[in-house]
Image (cartoon, rainbow, N blue to C red):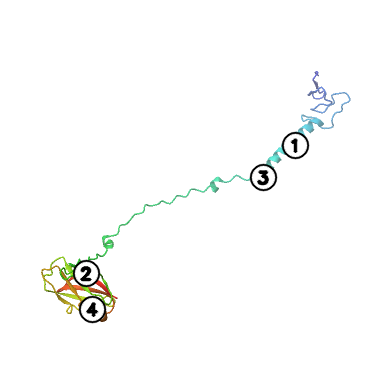
Amino acid sequence: MSGDTVECFNCGHANPSWAQVCRQCGFALQPGGRPSGGPRGIFPTDQASLISIGATLGAIVLAIGLGIFFAGLLPPAPNVALETPSPSPSPTTLPSVSVAPSAAESVAPSVAATPALPGTITFGTGLNVETREVTNPTATFVAGTGFAHSIRLTQTFAVNTIQEEITRVADGTVVQTREKGSVQVTPSATIAGFTAGVDTTKLIEGWGTGEFVMRVYRGVELLAEGHFTLS
């Protein structure tokens, strides 16, 4: 026995000097102390030791229970392999190819240009007999006015006679045939002028009103063409 500890007289275990009974076997160490009724052996049987061991075991059990409880509250970790979408390959854009039309498809039907006529016709209400040019040029005539026209070529007439044909545009009626419209010209001249000899009142009575076209021929060749209106 030392000042800090006291050895059990029964089992020799060192106990604190203030211990009433041996912590190893429960044997009374102090006068008046009573040995515990529990079995004697290597396990402590005194009340203080049992309380301490019980508290330790209870804390362990409580910690395990709390761990299980909180583990049940946490959501399961997501399966990354299942939820992560695999990248889909982006569609490959192929360059567009312009197909040039074949020669047979791209060839538009050609339109033959109308050849220019060698002469022109000018209309007016009067005529200069020296120059054979019209006076008061106009293409619209009313009743009671004069009617004259001149024909100018880029070449000489080269004939003594030309023919004038007049057609009403609205219905295509020929109001003056080429045979009735035959007039004399100077073969070496490039210009010729004529008057109707009557005012437009007579022309309107015979031809009616509307738009008309005059065509001048040299044989079968069309020399000039001009439009005028009677109203």
Label 1 crowd bin: few (<14), some (14–19), many (20+), radius 10 Å: few
Looking at the image, can residue 121 be seen?
A: no
Label 4 crowd bin: few (<14), some (14–19), many (20+), radius 10 Å: some
Disc nearer the start of the sequence (4/2):
2
Type of amino acid at the residue the image marks with label 4: Val
| Residue at which label 4 appears | 174
- Tell me the mark number nearer the camera, choosing from 4 and 1: 4
| Residue at which label 1 appears | 58
- Tell me the mark number nearer the camera, choosing from 2 and 1: 2
| Residue at which label 3 appears | 73
| Residue at which label 2 appears | 135
Going by the image, does 100 lie left or right of 21? left
Disc nearer the start of the sequence (2/1):
1
**Residue at 26% in and 72% down:** 228
Looking at the image, can residue 56 be seen?
A: yes
Name of the residue lying farthest toward the right: 32
Instruction: Place residue 127 in its image quadrant.
Output: bottom left
- Tell me the mark number nearer the camera, choosing from 4 and 3: 4
Residue 123 % position (x, y): 23, 71
Quadrant containing the N terminus in the rendered view: top right
Disc nearer the start of the sequence (4/3):
3
162 vs 10, nearest the viewer: 162
- Tell me the mark number nearer the camera, choosing from 2 and 3: 2
